[in-house]
């Protein structure tokens, strides 16, 4: 898997653990559902501000998500 795919899997795991659907989570962070869905599929290379926004909404740090993404190698 590519880094965006591994990060997407980490985002999905954390989002589901919080009980959000993709649509409700995207609404929560002010993002369109189809764009967020593409993030979880690893189809987007995130800008740092978008990465921060997604992580903040999940209640985690960028570094924790990177660590999880690296562990999924």
Image: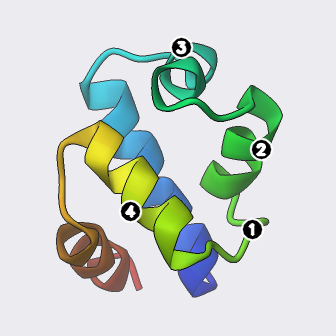
Residue drawn at (62%, 72%) of the image: 46
- Quadrant containing the C terminus is bottom left
Earlier in the chain: of badge 3 and badge 1, it is: 3
Confirm whether residue 73 shows in the render: yes
Q: Is residue 61 above or below residue 35?
A: below
**In this figure, which residue is indicated by the disc labeled 1?**
44
Q: Earlier in the sequence, mark 4 or mark 1?
A: 1
- Other-residue count near label 3 (Cα within 10 Å), few / some / many at <14 / 14–19 / ≥20: some
Q: Mark 4 and mark 1: span between their CA atoms?
A: 14 Å
The residue identified by callout 4 is: 52
Query: What's the CA distance linking mark 2 and mark 4?
Result: 15 Å
Query: Which of the numbered marks, if any, corresponds to residue 26?
Result: none
Asked if disc 1 and disc 2 are in contact, CB closer than 8 Å, the reply is yes
Secondary structure beneath label 1? loop
Provide the residue designation for mark 3: 24
Question: Badge 2 is on which residue?
Answer: 35
| Callout in the foreground (2, 4) | 4
Between circles 3 and 4, the one closer to the viewer is 4
Gap between marks 3 and 1 measured at Cα: 20 Å
**Sequence order check, earlier mark of 1 and 2:** 2
**Coordinates of residue 14 in the picture (x, y in percent):** 30, 41
| Residue in view at x 52 percent, y 16 percent | 21
């Amino acid at each position: 898997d590519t880094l965006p795919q591994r990060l997407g899997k980490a985002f999905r795991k954390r989002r589901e653990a919080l009980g959000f659907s993709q649509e409700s989570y995207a609404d929560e962070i002010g993002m369109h559902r189809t764009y967020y869905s593409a993030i979880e599929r690893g189809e987007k290379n995130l800008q740092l501000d978008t990465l921060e926004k997604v992580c903040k909404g999940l209640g985690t740090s960028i570094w924790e998500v990177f660590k999880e993404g690296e562990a999924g190698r």
